[in-house]
């Protein structure tokens, strides 16, 4: 008898976990991944690195979670009350039976993520004093060594070197090649600044050409900004074009609108510098002449007055002293000018000596000298060995058995053993022997044997 006959309705009984699993499958299958807009509330980052929070609007809310791997990829710092756009999967946390969204991407609503990250980090570092003008260092007037951190293949380095060459030839430049775009750029820029800071350059230019905010982002990284601030060497930030600003512009000692402008800031034009010296010299001489003429005029007036005639000698002495001071000052200026010219010439000579061509020439001369010494040593050894060879050859030739055979002697060999016969006792009648002369051999058979009287067996 069936249940229908008895009037009993067939029932399907679910377990709680089975129901929650079914709901999760339906949500993930029907809705799945979506973009969602809302306001962050109850933001919390667990020790595991995962973020747990609530997304809400005026009428409702939903639980959200963002795992550590995705959280590390966002540039800005999420905060309570921030309006965001998120992308993730709608699912159910089966254990509690609550639906939630697992977020993989997050963007600030109304402002780009990078721009928001820029503003947040700028506010933080400014509060710490990294942009304080009191911390800025002055650029040297005439640097001996200029360090540059940039890409060796970019337009920025070409522009900088072109300007430096035009303004002051033979200036010593130390380039630290670094990537200026991408994930690896941050570490290489930091390494370059620290290396040049310890190397001993007088000023450092850090920068690159223009680009989007994404391209320029390595110069907004916190570790780069802090490294620029902590450097003991004056740093010029030359990133992008004039309208571009990065956080290194604020922490650097000087901000240049372009890499070319940085090169113009770092060193004065040699011609302009010399003209400035000449101008100051003329001003100094003119001022001395004015002072001299003023005192001379006052002296002439004083000499015409009664009561001052008695001090003519004193005045004359002071006048001579002034003339002497003037001559000393002019001599000092000539010496100072010669000293400056000498320092410039020495600097140019030092730069030439440090050039790769000079080092290559020096090493080549050293190598040629070593080669010549080695050739002489080899020839000496060869001659010595040759003399020894001739000596031993002559000695060996003198002791050769063939020389003895040439004087009429011969060697007897017992055959077939080919054993040298030294004594008559080694032979028996009928033995086959081979007799060796200086010009050949002969075979014979022993027919008789005769012993000395004392050797008779």
Image: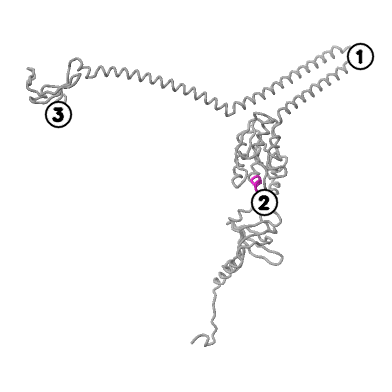
Of residues 330 and 7, the one drawn nearer to the viewer in this rendering? 7
Q: Marks 2 and 3, how far apart in space?
A: 104 Å
In this rendering, which labeled residue sits more in front, label 1 or label 3? 3
The earlier-in-sequence mark between 1 and 2 is: 2
The earlier-in-sequence mark between 1 and 3 is: 1
Q: Position of residue 309 (x, y in %)?
A: 89, 12
Left or right of 379 on screen, residue 260: right
Q: Secondary structure at mark 3?
A: loop
Reading the image, the residue beneath label 3 is 416
Residue 273 falls in image quadrant: top right
Q: Position of residue 64 (x, y in %)?
A: 63, 62
Left or right of 337 on screen, residue 51: left
Reading the image, the residue beneath label 1 is 304
In this rendering, the answer to whether 414 lies above or below 232 is above
What's the magenta region?
A: 213-221
In this rendering, the answer to whether 428 lies above or below 206 is above
Of residues 238 and 310, the one drawn nearer to the viewer in this rendering? 238
Q: Secondary structure at mark 1?
A: helix
In this rendering, which labeled residue sits more in front, label 2 or label 3? 3
Q: Residue at x 41, y 20 (%)?
A: 379
Reading the image, the residue beneath label 2 is 114
């Amino acid at each position: 008898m069936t249940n229908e006959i008895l009037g009993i309705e067939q029932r399907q009984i679910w377990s709680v976990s089975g129901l929650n699993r079914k709901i999760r499958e339906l949500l993930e299958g029907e809705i799945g991944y979506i973009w969602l807009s809302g306001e962050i509330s109850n933001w919390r980052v667990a020790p595991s690195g995962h973020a747990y929070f609530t997304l809400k609007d005026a009428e409702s809310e939903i639980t959200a979670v963002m795992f550590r791997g995705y959280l590390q990829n966002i540039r800005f710092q999420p905060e309570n009350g921030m309006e965001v756009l998120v992308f993730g999967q709608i699912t159910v946390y089966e254990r509690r039976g609550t639906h939630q969204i697992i977020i993989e991407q997050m963007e600030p609503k109304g402002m780009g993520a990078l721009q928001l990250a820029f503003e947040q980090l700028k506010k933080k570092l400014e509060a710490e004093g990294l942009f304080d003008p009191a911390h800025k260092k002055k650029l040297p007037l005439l640097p001996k060594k200029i360090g540059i951190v940039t890409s060796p293949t970019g337009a920025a380095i070409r522009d900088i070197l072109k300007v430096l060459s035009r303004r002051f030839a033979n200036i010593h430049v130390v380039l630290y090649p670094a990537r200026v775009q991408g994930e690896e750029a941050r570490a290489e820029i930091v390494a370059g600044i620290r290396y040049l800071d310890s190397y001993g350059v007088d000023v450092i230019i850090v920068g690159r050409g223009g680009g989007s905010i994404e391209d320029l982002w390595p110069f907004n990284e916190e570790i780069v900004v802090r490294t620029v601030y902590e450097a003991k060497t004056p740093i010029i930030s030359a990133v992008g074009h004039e309208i571009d600003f990065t956080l290194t512009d604020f922490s650097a000692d000087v901000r240049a609108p372009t890499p070319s402008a940085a090169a113009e800031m770092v060193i004065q034009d040699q011609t302009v510098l010399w003209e400035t010296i000449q101008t100051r010299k003329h001003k100094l001489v003119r001022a001395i002449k004015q002072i001299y003429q003023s005192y001379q005029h006052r002296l002439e007036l004083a000499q015409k007055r009664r009561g001052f005639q008695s001090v003519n000698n004193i005045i004359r002495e002071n006048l001579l002293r002034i003339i002497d001071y003037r001559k000393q000052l002019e001599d000092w200026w000539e010496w100072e000018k010669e000293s400056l010219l000498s320092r410039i010439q020495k600097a140019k000579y030092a730069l030439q000596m440090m050039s790769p061509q000079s080092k290559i020439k020096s090493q080549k001369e050293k190598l040629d000298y070593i080669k010549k010494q080695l050739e002489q040593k080899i020839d000496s050894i060869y001659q010595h060995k040759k003399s020894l060879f001739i000596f031993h050859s002559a000695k060996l030739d003198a002791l050769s058995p063939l020389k003895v055979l040439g004087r009429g002697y011969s060697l007897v060999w017992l055959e077939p053993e080919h054993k040298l016969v030294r004594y008559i006792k080694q032979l028996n009648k009928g033995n086959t022997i081979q007799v060796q002369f200086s010009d050949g051999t002969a075979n014979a058979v022993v027919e008789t044997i005769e012993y000395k009287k004392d050797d008779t067996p």
